[in-house]
């Protein structure tokens, strides 16, 4: 029995790097102590993986043969509604001031709030989906038994507790935009450390409970490792510097999405291609290189497009592209295309949330069939 049949999505090595990055990234943060090294590491990750992950679900939907029948039969989900999302965002930004009581900056803030709320749900949904996938791969007969526990853990620990940790550190998006007060200022410094320790204990206890249940339910090592990864990242939210948590939380999310997309894209073949007579050597080489070609393509696209999409980071100094291409970013900031680029960037985030749901909507039989062709092909 090889690695693939033991419950890993692709293999133990592939999954360890991409899907279980929350574990090794946590240890890497402890090694990269100087903040300057962490900043450089994150800047490189932003260029390579941010936009790559944002368009990973687009690639699966529009770049693979397996999803072609689904695109044809579900045009509302894959064409009409995505177009409406883009047009709605642009309409919010371009509506004449005489018809709106809000300035363009206030409208952008409103869209960022929507992005924040949808993004928190999206992160939790990704964790939940990967946990269910691992459980199904290892022990499909009992996959339904842990469904409710996974939901509570992903949205509770991976959502609610993470937001609470950010509020306690005074670094929540809601506080930075002065929508919620700074709890550190309001409560004083005395009570916050105790709450941070309490939150840490709650995360550790919840993680131990989930790992114990996973062991008893025979969910498999891959799922146990992913549960540990979520728990470790949530502990970082309470115990380490907020920037360290941002680096860890976002990069794990990006790597998991890209690793899954590269694996699935690498399994995409023409109808009947598997039946062709080819040498084992050529077949093995093709199997090895296909996911890497998908990965490299997504990363190159990410490097090229990051300056244009990073314009959505409307706070001063919040764009890494300013350090690499200062002239370009200065021109974009003051160009007549600025509002349009902010709208497209924000819309691409909403589209990513929507397309991820469309591509991995396993409750739909046709979607499940398309995804399974790529997930479980070897």
Image: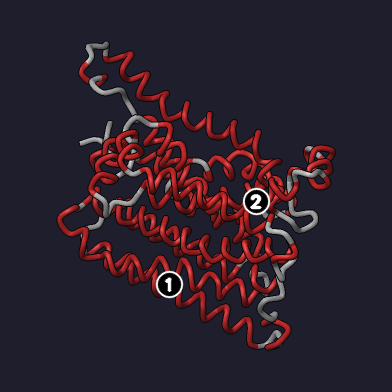
Q: Can the viewer see residue 220?
A: no
Q: Position of residue 256 (x, y in %)?
A: 46, 47
Q: Secondary structure at mark 1?
A: helix
Q: Residue tagged by mark 2?
A: 343
| Left or right side of 289 for 53 | right
Q: Residue tagged by mark 1?
A: 156
Q: Position of residue 203 (x, y in %)?
A: 45, 72
Q: Can the viewer see residue 92?
A: yes
Structural distance between the alpha carbons of marks 1 and 2: 31 Å
The residue that appears at 29% across and 67% down in the rendered structure is 212
Residue 274 versus residue 185 in the image, above or below:
above
> Which of the two residues, 109 or 137, is positioned nearer the viewer here?
109
| Left or right side of 168 for 176 | right
> Which of the two residues, 259 or 41, is positioned nearer the viewer here?
259
Q: Quadrant of residue 378?
A: top left
Residue 224, disc: none
Q: Position of residue 196 (x, y in %)?
A: 57, 78
Q: Quadrant of the N terminus?
A: top left
The residue that appears at 50% across and 66% down in the rendered structure is 234
CB contact under 8 Å: marks 1 and 2: no
């Amino acid at each position: 029995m090889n690695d693939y049949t033991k419950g890993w999505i692709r293999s133990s090595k592939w999954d360890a790097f991409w899907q279980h990055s929350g574990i090794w990234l946590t240890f890497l943060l402890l090694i990269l102590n100087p903040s300057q090294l962490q900043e450089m590491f994150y800047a490189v990750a932003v260029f390579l993986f941010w936009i790559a992950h944002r368009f990973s679900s687009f690639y699966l939907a529009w770049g693979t043969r397996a999803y072609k029948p689904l695109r044809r039969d579900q045009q509302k989900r894959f064409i009409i509604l995505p177009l409406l999302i883009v047009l709605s965002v642009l309409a919010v930004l371009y509506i004449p001031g005489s018809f709106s009581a809000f300035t363009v900056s206030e409208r952008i803030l409103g869209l960022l709030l929507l992005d924040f709320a949808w993004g928190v749900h999206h992160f939790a949904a990704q964790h939940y989906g990967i946990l269910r996938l691992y459980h199904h791969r290892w022990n499909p007969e009992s996959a339904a038994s842990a469904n409710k526990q996974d939901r509570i853990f992903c949205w509770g620990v991976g959502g609610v507790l993470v937001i609470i940790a950010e509020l306690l550190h005074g670094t929540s998006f809601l506080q930075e935009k002065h929508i919620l007060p700074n709890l550190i200022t309001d409560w004083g410094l005395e009570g916050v450390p105790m709450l941070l320790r309490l939150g840490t204990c709650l995360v550790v206890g919840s993680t131990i409970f989930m790992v114990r249940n996973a062991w008893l339910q025979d969910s498999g090592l891959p799922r146990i490792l992913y549960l540990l990864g979520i728990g470790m990242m949530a502990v970082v939210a309470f115990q380490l510097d907020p920037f360290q948590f941002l680096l860890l939380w976002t990069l794990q999310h990006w790597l998991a999405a890209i690793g899954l997309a590269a694996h699935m894209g690498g399994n995409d073949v023409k109808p009947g291609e598997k039946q062709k007579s080819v040498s084992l050597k050529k077949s093995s080489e093709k199997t090895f290189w296909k996911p890497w070609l998908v990965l490299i393509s997504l990363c190159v696209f990410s490097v090229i497009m990051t300056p244009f999409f990073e314009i959505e980071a409307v706070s001063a100094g919040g764009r890494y592209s300013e350090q690499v291409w200062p002239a370009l970013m200065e021109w974009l900031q003051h160009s007549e295309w600025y509002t349009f680029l902010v709208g497209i960037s924000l819309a691409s985030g909403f589209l990513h949330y929507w397309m991820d749901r469309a591509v991995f909507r396993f409750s739909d039989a046709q979607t499940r069939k398309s995804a399974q062709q790529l997930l479980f092909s070897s």
